[in-house]
Amino acid sequence: MSVLQTAGGILALLLLYAVFLVACEDKIIYHPHKYPQGIWNPSSFNVKVEDVFFQAKDGTKLHGWYIPSANAQATLLWFHGNAGNLTHRLENIQQLQPLALNIFIFDYRGYGKSEGKPSEAGIYQDSQAAYDYLIREKNVVPLENLFLFGRSLGGICAVEVASSNPAAGLILESVFTSARDMAGQVFPLLPIGWAIRSKFSAVEKVPYLKLPKLFLHGTKDEIVPYKLGRKLYSAAAEPKEFYDIEGAGHNDTYSVGGREYFSALNRFITDTLKMEKQP
């Protein structure tokens, strides 16, 4: 077999693999854990939750937890990442309690107790529905005290909501720029970025967001490269700030970051609230 034939065979195999990856796109992106998978006993973490059911615009029934805090200084609307469900964030929720925040965390369609199957358009609908529910039904949530918090894929949803809704601030942790950029990182030898259906392009939207923004990223993130977090930050409009979580990977940010991590969150929230009160 000639060198050209060998090279052609390898190229054909790579192209076939690329086609396979594109066909399996949703399975690569979304890793939902359906009920009863997870930790459905929040009291084991000393967290008291209110079960919430609401609907997306297309009628999909969704589930969330509302966790009130006595004398809350603000409310956090939490958009979680692409794996597990809301119960896998219980330890993190527990450790946020000293910050005196109401927290509303919800599951996208296909996750936890939420119905349906995830898709880019679908989870954007779910994110808007969560925002609408929180504003309409929880009248303890003034917009000037509402912070949108998105981690990883959830950060893309938080940016989407911030693009068309008011909020006090936006917190983006371990968030990438776009699906195309991520495809280039995960499959550097395969040009599949042009072929995938999903866009998830936060980098095209953050230049137009004028609300205060905090970007956080683990310096050793093994899933979303640190440089993509920096690229997203660079594209964002002011006001903005960036916090390095030294030594943290993708899923251990709050445990590795420790006290300094939570202090950075609290400082951003309190400083933003002070700015809101200025005439």
Image (cartoon, rainbow, N blue to C red):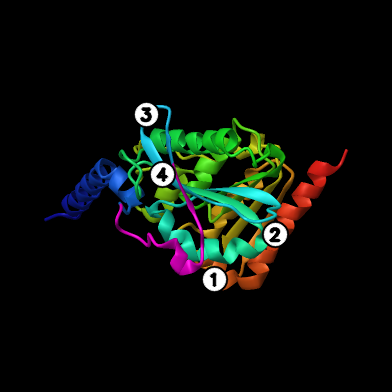
Given residues 107 and 219, the one toward you in this image is 107
Residue 21's tag is none
Where is residue 129 drawn, in percent x and y? 48, 34
Mark 1–mark 2 Cα distance, whole angstroms, equals 16 Å
Q: Amino acid at mark 2?
A: Asn
Q: Amino acid at mark 4?
A: His
Query: Which residue is the site of mark 1?
Result: 255
Where is residue 218 drawn, in percent x and y? 56, 64
Label 4, secondary structure: give it.
strand
Mark 4–mark 3 Cα distance, whole angstroms, equals 13 Å
Query: Which residue is the site of mark 3?
Result: 59
Query: Is residue 48 placed above or below 176 in the rendered structure?
Result: below
Task: Tell me if 7 is positioned left or right of 263 in this view.
Answer: left
Mark 3 Cα shell of 10 Å, populated few (<14), some (14-19), many (≥20): few
Mark 4 vs 2, N-terminal side: 4
Question: Residue at the spot x=54%, y=71% of the render?
Answer: 255
Mark 4 Cα shell of 10 Å, populated few (<14), some (14-19), many (≥20): many
Question: Residue at the spot x=26%, y=45% of the render?
Answer: 24
Query: Which residue is the site of mark 2?
Result: 266
Mark 4–mark 2 Cα distance, whole angstroms, equals 27 Å
Question: Residue at the spot x=24%, y=50% of the render?
Answer: 14
Question: Residue at the spot x=65%, y=71% of the render?
Answer: 259
Q: Nearer the viewer, mark 2 or mark 3?
A: 3
